[in-house]
Amino acid sequence: MRVRSSKRNRINVITLGCSKNIYDSEILMGQLKASGKDVVHQRDGQIVVINTCGFIDNAKEESVDTILDAVRSKKNGQVDKVFVTGCLSERYKDDLKKEIPDVDDYFGTRDLPLLLKALGADYRRELIGERLTTTPQHYAYLKISEGCDRPCSFCAIPLMRGSHKSTPIEELVLEAKALADKGVVELILIAQDLTYYGLDIYKKRNLAELLRALAEVEGISWIRLHYLFPTGFPEDILDVIHDNPKVCNYIDIPLQHISDPVLKSMRRGTTMEKTNFLLKKMRKKVPDIAIRTTLIVGYPGETEDDFETLLKWVKDQKFERLGVFAYSHEENTHAYGLVDDVPNETKQSRLNAIMEAQMSISEKYNCSKIGTILNCIVDREESNGSYVCRTEKDSPDVDNEVHLNCPNIHLKKGSFVQVKVTQASEYDLEGVLV
């Protein structure tokens, strides 16, 4: 007879950083559970595994602070063991061992079998799609490839994640079916670059075929695309988005900048003319598409003219969703050899100017929705009896929300409802149930 393990043997997995890290933690926890381990996510446990982020300065600082907190808990007797994995550990393992030696061991992004062995578990290759999901039950991330072969000057991802490696379509379909069986209705496809999918194993960009295969999975209602690189964009996916109601009218395409000198220094492989042509084609083929992009301001050598070009372009393009980062000078990247010559105050000022422009764009876009009826997914119930929902043009955590007040009606999380929009602000909508 199996006896539930005590808290002393419980493994607490702490996840920091992006959705790729969330996915990796879920795979880790699925493997641990399959080995009979008592595993929890970001709760109390005597064995701590920290899945770190090493992308930019703020993320690295948060990861180091979390490691130090766990080490202090170990010294105080509240924790027995501390293990560190993920991007920061992959990138700075030797330095971390010297600076924080009280961690029991460090593992990189490709060391899952070794980490499991340290935790007293076996790595089981046959567990395709077996994960302990940490997102709400109705949506989940689906990582379709690992690593990146792009040469972007500012990015350290290839140092931490390695070269691009696609997961075969049949394995992803099996994983999607397993998720659907657990109640997932929305798949959020993630990778360092979705557009590169298939080049290594099918010798062609094969995202469109993958989308069609996933759309056949019973129970899946929405498929959302995150992180599409503009260079070499597979235009056949626009036909799939247009023709298949399961594929959301939503694209996350991090464009980073638009000034030609900056794009060239960033090694993005594109120009303002090519980028604008692609955006025009997207909107022509999928007229109702919502385009999310992210930008970098304060890149080395970014002049005032470069920035003004970027700001004017943002105002002209009127992206439905947009985020901005201040440039972070990362060791061992190509751009690290350049002089980080834009002062921090200027970086922040430029970031604020972009976001102020975007707030106005977003408010006008949202106000245009007043009086319309939108198909929304129910994400959660608020304490006052209202509900928080999303449209197909909104990804969890980063995009708009739709606030629905219906205190006398119970709505199931993950269900779809028709909402008539009554009010709008810069980033949220309010409505009533139809």
Image (tube, rainbow, N blue to C red):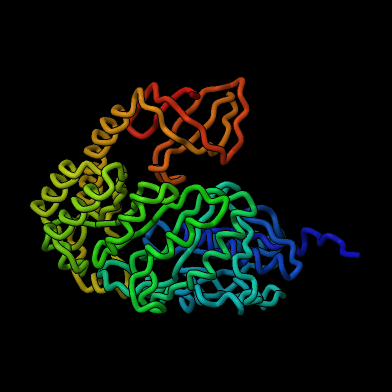
Q: Residue at x 21, y 66 (%)?
A: 266
Seen in the image, is 77 located left or right of residue 379?
Answer: right
Q: Nearer the viewer, residue 179 or 285?
A: 285
**Quarter of the N terminus within the rendering:** bottom right
Seen in the image, is 419 located left or right of residue 24?
Answer: left
Spot occupied by residue 321 in the image (x, y as percentages of width and height): 31, 44
Q: Is residue 155 visible?
A: yes
Q: Residue at x 46, y 66 (%)?
A: 144
Spot occupied by residue 243 in the image (x, y as percentages of width and height): 36, 50
Spot occupied by residue 131 in the image (x, y as percentages of width and height): 62, 62
How many marks the image carries: the answer is 0
In the rendered view, would you say 80 is above or below 117?
A: above
Q: Nearer the viewer, residue 241 or 390?
A: 241
Q: Is residue 63 visible?
A: no
In the rendered view, would you say 400 is above or below 154?
A: above
Q: Nearer the viewer, residue 205 or 123?
A: 205
Q: Residue at x 61, y 78 (%)?
A: 113
**Hey, which quadrant is residue 66 in on the image?**
bottom right
Q: Nearer the viewer, residue 250 or 261?
A: 250
**Hey, which quadrant is residue 253 in on the image?**
bottom left
Spot occupied by residue 350 in the image (x, y as percentages of width and height): 20, 47
